[in-house]
């Protein structure tokens, strides 16, 4: 499936062709990555651990959005609404029935799937802008339902949830498992019939239909899968924060998730992960920069404004100057090393 | 009676804002999701010029309106021209990013306290009795009159003037228009300028009525369903759509639940998308449909 990496490399069996990892070097790098990921919680302090947890948590939603936008080509501006749906399902089940983890997680997934089906219905008739707008509208409806619950039941500031996992290290391993499972699931799904039909409808719908792909089914399945994963991320988010409130799922969160896809690079799972790293670490980077410039005290009350402005600027710069995103840069660097001492790929590839 | 007046004022607000969405979409097929922020920038522009030209309210208003137009042209010249010909998604995302950038920059530049530009202008917002029991604020009345004037002006501009005809031509078929010697960048910049001008005027008047707050952006976003209900490429549609959305919002708030205020427009939008996605007056062929 994956592109041959080095020159002179070719495959002789289907098994080798299906393998996620081609070369020994790749396996070595992966082993190194796994080892460092496993070692991280024992070496890092509380702050870094919290950051790592946030990255892992966000990456689940980002990969889910990448499946939908990056691969199936359906725009969604309602991602925060979906996270909210998962979080509120968890919050409500916990508060009303005292439901444990193993009930709330599947319930959130089910709610996510149902909402995904609902989100997906407009996509059968609408495309492009109009679809984006309908998902935006659904975002507001879901949030309103959540707020309504909060005010009706008197939890006007939010729903408090007791998490079964308290230790940040335990959280790290839980989230790592969840993120890795999501990524493996997505990578394999994309190589299956479903994933290929998503790419086909992304490229050109009419041609995909002519080739015998059920466009409705492909679109709905993209929405359902993406929304289910996001809703599960919402459930984990609720437990991780120990708190559910409609304020946590503003339009800005949606924009952040869309930014992970744009900054990371459309159509790449690696891009979603890189984009997540960028988006989650960005505010901390800005804060560090402000401290370094000695502006931290003066701008203390408007940190969020600095964040917004810088974030908008970064998004614009990526859209204008690097539409391929971080993964585009990554690939260029990789190609530079692979092709060295040559500068270009041989003609005909 | 009071309900009718409320509907009229809200519809005027939505109509004045949504004509910006329609102008930009009709001419360049780009949906500007930064319109709410640009509108707020217009309001801050008024606050700034009001303190700059204190004692000369009319000069201040004229200056702020000119400023709003220039801001729109500047947005196109600095950012959006790079997005001409890019995919729809990229252009929309660029406006979203611009919105976030502006929101942050405005707090940095003007602080996040509520401001009242009307006081700086030295005027008061009188409450005018109207047909028996109903009351309307002076700013609200101005808003209705101004919306009527703006729409009449835009219709005349698009039908009769040379630049208006160029704008319609560019909206119908950009390639053909360019080959006939119309400078597309000029036309697009003008569309952005006019859209920001009308949006900015709406922002200024809302600011005169209720002060400049972050909710202004939400109002800008809520006006978008009005544009879509009427049909994204139809000015007359925007007027009717605003009336529909405003009536639905005011009536539901009054009779059902005040908390609904933020969702009603989007609910109307979804209903419209399900039934008639191209809007009441929109052109059907133009719509990117499956």
Image: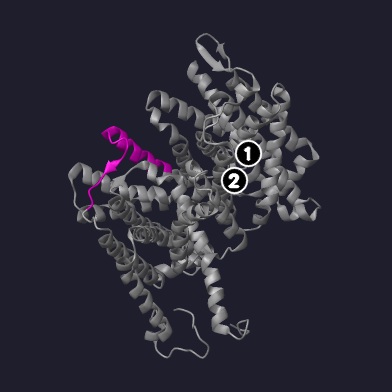
In the rendered image, the vertical position of residue A342 relative to residue A152, given as above or below: below
The mark nearer the N terminus, 2 or 1, is 1
* In the rendered image, the vertical position of residue A211 relative to residue A105, given as above or below: below
Q: Is residue B188 above or below residue B217?
A: below
Q: Which quadrant of the figure has residue B108?
A: top right
Secondary element type, mark 1: helix
Discs 2 and 1 share one subunit = yes
Q: Is residue A286 magenta?
A: no
Q: Quadrant of residue A36?
A: bottom left
Task: Count residues near mark 1 (Cα–Cα under 10 Å), then give few for <14, some for 14-19, many for 20+.
Answer: many
- Does the residue at mark 2 contact the one at mark 1 (Cβ under 8 Å)? yes
Q: For this view, does A268 lie left or right of residue A167?
A: right
Q: Quadrant of the N terminus of chain A?
A: bottom left
Q: How is the image coloured?
A: one colour
Tell me the CA gap for discs 2 and 1. 9 Å
The C terminus of chain A sits in image quarter: bottom right
Please state which of residues B20 and B248 is positioned toward the viewer in this rendering. Answer: B20
Q: Residue at x 74, y 51 (%)?
A: B184
Whole-percent x, y for residue B290 in the image = 52, 55
Provide residue B65's location: percent of width, then percent of height.
Answer: 69, 32
Please count the marks in the image: 2
Say which of A7 and B59 sits in front: B59
Magenta part of the chain: A140-163
Can residue B83 be seen? yes
Where is residue B19 drawn, in percent x and y? 62, 36
Is A149 colored magenta in this rendering? yes
Instruction: Identify residue for label 1.
Output: B20
Residue at the front extreme of this rendering: A294
Furthest toward the top, the residue is B132
User: In what element is the residue under mark 2?
Assistant: loop
Relative image position of residue A7 (x, y in whole percent): 53, 88
The residue tagged 2 is B32
């Amino acid at each position: 499936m994956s592109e041959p990496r080095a020159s002179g490399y070719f495959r002789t069996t289907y098994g080798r062709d299906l393998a996620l990892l081609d070369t020994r070097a790749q396996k070595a790098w992966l082993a190194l990555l796994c080892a460092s990921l496993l070692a991280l919680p024992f070496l890092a302090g509380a702050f870094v651990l919290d950051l790592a947890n946030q990255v892992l948590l966000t990456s689940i939603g980002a990969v889910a959005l990448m499946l939908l936008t990056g691969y199936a080509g359906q725009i969604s501006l309602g991602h925060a609404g979906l996270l909210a749906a998962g979080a509120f399902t968890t919050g409500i089940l916990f508060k009303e029935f005292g439901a444990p983890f193993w009930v709330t997680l599947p319930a959130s997934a089910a709610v996510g799937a149902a909402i995904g089906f609902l989100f997906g219905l407009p996509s059968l008739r609408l495309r492009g802008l109009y679809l984006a707008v309908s998902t935006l509208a659904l975002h507001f409806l879901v949030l309103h339902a959540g707020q309504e619950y909060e005010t009706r039941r008197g939890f006007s500031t939010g729903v408090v949830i007791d998490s079964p996992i308290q230790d940040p290290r335990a959280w790290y391993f839980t989230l790592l498992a969840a993120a890795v499972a999501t990524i493996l699931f997505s990578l394999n799904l994309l190589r299956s019939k479903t994933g290929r039909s998503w790419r086909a409808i992304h490229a050109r719908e009419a041609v995909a239909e002519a080739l015998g792909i059920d466009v409705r089914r492909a679109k709905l399945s993209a929405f359902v899968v993406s929304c289910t994963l996001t809703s599960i991320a919402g459930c984990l988010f609720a437990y991780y924060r120990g708190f559910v409130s409609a304020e946590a799922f503003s339009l800005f969160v949606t924009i952040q998730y869309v930014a992970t896809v744009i900054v990371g690079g459309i159509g790449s799972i690696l891009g979603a992960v890189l984009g997540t790293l960028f988006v989650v670490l960005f505010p901390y980077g800005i804060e560090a920069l402000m401290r370094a410039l000695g502006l931290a005290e003066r701008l203390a009350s408007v940190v969020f404004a600095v964040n917004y402005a810088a974030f908008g600027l970064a998004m614009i710069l990526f859209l204008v100057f690097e539409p391929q995103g971080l993964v585009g840069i990554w690939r260029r660097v990789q190609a530079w090393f692979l092709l060295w001492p040559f500068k270009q790929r041989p003609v005909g590839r | 009676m009071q309900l009718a007046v409320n509907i009229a004022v809200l519809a005027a607000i939505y109509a004045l804002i949504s004509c910006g969405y329609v102008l930009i979409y009709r001419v360049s097929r780009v949906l500007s999701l930064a319109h709410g922020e640009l509108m707020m920038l217009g309001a801050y522009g008024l606050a700034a010029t009001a303190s700059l030209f204190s004692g000369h309210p009319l000069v201040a208003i004229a200056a702020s309106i000119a400023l709003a137009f220039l801001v729109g042209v500047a947005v196109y010249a600095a950012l959006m021209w790079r997005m001409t010909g890019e995919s729809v998604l990229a252009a929309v995302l660029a406006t979203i990013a611009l919105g976030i950038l502006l929101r942050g920059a405005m707090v940095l530049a003007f602080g996040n306290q509520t401001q009242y530009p009307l006081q700086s202008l030295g005027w008061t917002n009188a409450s005018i009795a109207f047909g028996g029991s109903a009351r309307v604020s002076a700013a609200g009345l101005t808003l209705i009159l101004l919306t009527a004037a703006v729409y009449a002006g835009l219709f005349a501009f698009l039908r009769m003037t040379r630049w208006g005809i160029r704008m319609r031509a560019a909206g119908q078929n950009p390639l053909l228009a360019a080959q006939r010697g119309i400078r597309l960048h000029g036309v697009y910049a003008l569309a952005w300028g006019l859209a920001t001008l009308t949006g900015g005027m709406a922002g200024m008047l809302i600011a005169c009525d209720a002060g400049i707050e972050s909710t202004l952006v939400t109002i800008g976003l809520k006006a978008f369903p009005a544009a879509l209900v009427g049909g994204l490429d139809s000015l007359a549609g925007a007027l009717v759509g605003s009336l529909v959305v405003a009536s639905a919002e005011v009536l539901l708030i009054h009779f059902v639940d005040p908390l609904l205020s933020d969702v009603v427009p989007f609910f109307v939008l979804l209903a419209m998308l399900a039934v008639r996605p191209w809007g009441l007056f929109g052109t059907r062929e133009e719509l990117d449909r499956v």
